[in-house]
Image: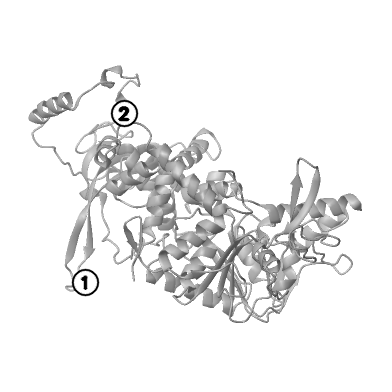
């Protein structure tokens, strides 16, 4: 199964694909889609966020299909997405209506409704837990039953936003509302400069590692934005679309789990008076699923992109054009394709130069 | 009509009809403004982004049931990526395929223009990694777009000049920029300089697709395409003099260089595998 580009390509590919299946099906235990979906929730969330497709079962299938490779799973879902006809845009959703499972603020200790820690790895010690090495379904079921007895019905909280407190005091930098349809980055090439809706979408679909690294660079000093997490909320939003046959009627499509972050940074505004006015500026980030670091990172970059500066994070084209999972991995992996013709052309120049 | 791959039904030519129509509109605009890069809503395909998805979206959008397709990669019909792309198109369209340049109605290619002359009823779709000839002048799209609008190409001329000053000759290998119809400077995709002259006043339609960069551009038939060069340092193709194909004996074509590690010898072999095969079968070929 050598890498032959001159002849025998077809057979070599078929042999490679067979071997791949042999690797994927390794071992005695079958991995059920349901198990991936239920037990690898955060991985599913990450795949869905980078694919821009809310489909937990398909995300699980994609992961099973590619031996758990994140970039491959995202790739498969994106390609599948291209085959689907786009019929609707959802109605605008407000996170004030979010049915929250987690909500914290690092800005205020007491917030209306209180802090809800929810399920989070922030408060556990990251010790390898040998106790679950041999856990059984029966044990888990028993534990879950007793847990559910104590927590009869999962409460779903809805609260106003923390930023509203600052808004009432007129301490918040106002951002003009845009009453126009959001730009759709999946159907159009990103315009530059990009509207904020396109920026936020691009970052929501971007590779998590890329977005986090960029935000970290800003935090460390390349374009210093050191925000306070005003509010981080994770919860369910109801998706509705307009009913075409009757005006004013909406159809409920389903629920999506999202993480939303509002970061506070200090902002100054030039006043006609002697001194500038100090206000609290906001950075916003929202992603599919439980994806907190990414949501915080987007909020930092959203802010950094709206201020002038020389750091990488202030450069819109730099930030927005290099983080798409498919684009970066696709172009990097294309380097494995034969470049015989182009390399020959380069060699020709080098040889001619030598002859000169 | 639906097509079946892995027990899943797909639309004819994979993409949904709305997407194909949208891409065809971008192609029409590209044909109307030769050499101008038309932005389009590039879709994700099951083939790697950077592996020919721009060309593939063009092919999928223009292909019909009666078309006959040829796919080549670096001149070869049998290269891994050509095989993979051909497989996807045939699985979702059921169209006929060929390795014969003459018999094809659509040819999708990476890094080569076929040796045989193409006709007015044929389309050559080229895959493009970097559509922007001004990218070496500025990494920013906002800047290069303005430069194109103002036909401000001194940055590219300077790049050619710097090569001459530094090395005594122009040093661009493949993807040597061209002026299209006296207006837009264009990357012809990384074809060897040997292929550049084939674009000038050609009979066939050239379509260029960059999937990752989301751009489509075109050279319509009978368009002036001039490779950029200074008068005292004229444009030169790669040296092919004194070489011949070890399989078919062809001269004055573009070659792959093959190195035999046992005998320590260099051989040359036609880069265009379909052309070479025809010559060996004694079929008549029509050189461009």
Closer to the camera in the image, B93 or A68: B93
Closer to the camera in the image, B44 or A274: B44
* Location of mark 2 (residue): A121
- In this view, B163 is above or below A228: below
Q: Position of residue B55 (x, y in %)?
A: 54, 64
Residue furthest to the front in view is B281
Share a chain, discs 1 and 2? yes
Query: Considering only order in the chain, which callout, 2 or 1, is on the residue closer to the N terminus?
Result: 2
Q: Position of residue A323 (x, y in %)?
A: 49, 47
- Residue at image point 73% right, 62% down: B176
Q: Position of residue B130 (x, y in %)?
A: 62, 58
* Location of mark 1 (residue): A244
In what element is the residue under mark 2?
A: helix
Gap in Å between the C-alphas at discs 1 and 2? 43 Å
- In this view, A339 is above or below A83: above
- Residue at image point 45% right, 61% down: B43
Dividing the image into 4 quarters, which one contains the N terminus of chain A? Answer: top right
Task: Count residues near mark 1 (Cα–Cα under 10 Å), then give few for <14, some for 14-19, many for 20+.
Answer: few
Mark 1 vs 2: CB contact within 8 A:
no
Q: Chain of mark 1?
A: A
- The image quarter containing residue B119 is bottom right
Judge from the rendering whether residue B65 lies leftward or rightward of residue A163; answer left or right: right
In what element is the residue under mark 1?
A: loop
Judge from the rendering whether residue A199 lies leftward or rightward of residue A258; answer left or right: right
Question: Is there any visible trace of residue B10 in the rendered image?
Answer: yes
Closer to the camera in the image, B243 or A33: B243
Q: Chain of mark 2?
A: A
- Residue at image point 61% right, 49% down: A4
Closer to the camera in the image, A211 or B78: B78
């Amino acid at each position: 199964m050598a890498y032959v580009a001159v002849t025998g390509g077809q057979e070599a590919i078929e042999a490679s694909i067979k071997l791949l299946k042999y690797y994927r099906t390794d071992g005695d235990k079958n991995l059920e889609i349901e198990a991936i979906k239920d037990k690898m929730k955060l991985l599913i969330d990450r795949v869905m966020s980078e694919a821009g497709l809310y489909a937990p079962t398909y995300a699980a299938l994609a992961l099973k299909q590619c031996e758990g490779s994140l970039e491959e799973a995202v790739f498969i879902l994106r390609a599948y997405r291209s085959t689907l006809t786009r019929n609707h845009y959802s109605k605008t959703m407000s996170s004030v209506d979010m049915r929250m499972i987690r909500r914290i603020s690092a800005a205020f200790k007491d917030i209306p409704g209180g802090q809800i820690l929810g399920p989070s790895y922030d408060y556990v010690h990251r010790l390898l837990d040998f106790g679950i090495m041999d856990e059984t379904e029966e044990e888990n079921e028993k534990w879950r039953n007793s847990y559910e007895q104590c927590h009869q019905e999962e409460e779903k909280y809805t609260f106003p936003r923390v930023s509203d407190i600052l808004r009432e005091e007129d301490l918040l930098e106002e951002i003009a509302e845009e009453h126009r349809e959001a730009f759709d980055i999946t159907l159009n090439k990103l315009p530059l400069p990009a509207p904020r809706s396109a920026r936020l979408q691009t970052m929501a679909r971007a590779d998590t590692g890329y977005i986090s690294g960029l935000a970290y660079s800003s935090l460390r000093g390349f374009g210093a934005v050191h925000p306070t997490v005003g509010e981080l909320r994770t919860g369910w939003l109801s998706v509705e679309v307009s009913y075409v046959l009757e005006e004013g009627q909406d159809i409920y499509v389903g629920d999506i789990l999202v993480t939303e972050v509002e970061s506070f940074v200090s902002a100054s505004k030039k006043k006609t008076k002697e001194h500038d006015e100090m206000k609290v500026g906001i950075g916003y980030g929202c992603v599919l699923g439980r994806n907190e670091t990414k949501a915080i990172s987007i909020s930092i970059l959203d802010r950094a992109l709206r201020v002038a500066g020389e750091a990488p994070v202030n450069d819109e084209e730099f930030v927005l054009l290099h983080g798409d999972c498919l684009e970066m991995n696709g172009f990097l992996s294309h380097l494995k394709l034969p470049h015989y013709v182009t390399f020959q052309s380069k060699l020709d120049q080098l040889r001619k130069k030598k002859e000169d | 009509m639906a097509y079946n791959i892995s027990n899943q039904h797909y639309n004819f030519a994979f993409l949904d009809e709305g997407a194909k129509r949208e891409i065809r509109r971008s192609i029409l605009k590209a044909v109307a403004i030769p050499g101008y890069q038309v932005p389009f809503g590039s879709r994700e395909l099951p083939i790697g982004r950077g592996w020919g998805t721009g060309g593939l979206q063009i092919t999928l959008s223009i292909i019909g049931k009666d078309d006959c397709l040829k796919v080549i990669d670096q001149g070869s019909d049998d290269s891994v990526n050509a095989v993979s792309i051909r497989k996807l198109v045939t699985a979702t369209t059921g169209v006929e395929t060929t390795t014969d340049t003459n018999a094809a109605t659509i040819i999708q290619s990476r890094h080569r223009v076929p040796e045989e002359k193409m006709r007015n009823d044929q389309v050559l779709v080229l895959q493009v990694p970097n559509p922007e000839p001004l990218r070496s002048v500025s990494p920013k799209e906002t800047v290069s777009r303005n430069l194109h609008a103002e036909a401000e190409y001194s940055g590219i001329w300077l790049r050619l000049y710097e090569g001459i000053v530094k090395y005594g000759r122009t040093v661009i290998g493949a993807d040597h920029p061209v002026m299209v119809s006296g207006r837009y400077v264009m990357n012809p995709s990384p074809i060897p300089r040997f292929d550049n002259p084939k674009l000038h006043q050609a009979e066939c339609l050239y379509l260029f697709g960059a999937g990752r960069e989301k751009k489509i551009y075109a050279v319509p038939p009978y368009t002036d395409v001039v490779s950029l060069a200074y008068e005292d340092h004229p444009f030169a193709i790669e040296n092919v003099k004194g070489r011949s194909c070890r399989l078919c004996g062809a001269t004055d074509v573009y070659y792959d260089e093959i190195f035999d590690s046992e005998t320590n010898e260099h051989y040359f072999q036609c880069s265009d595998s379909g052309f070479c095969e025809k010559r060996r079968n004694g079929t008549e070929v029509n050189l461009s």
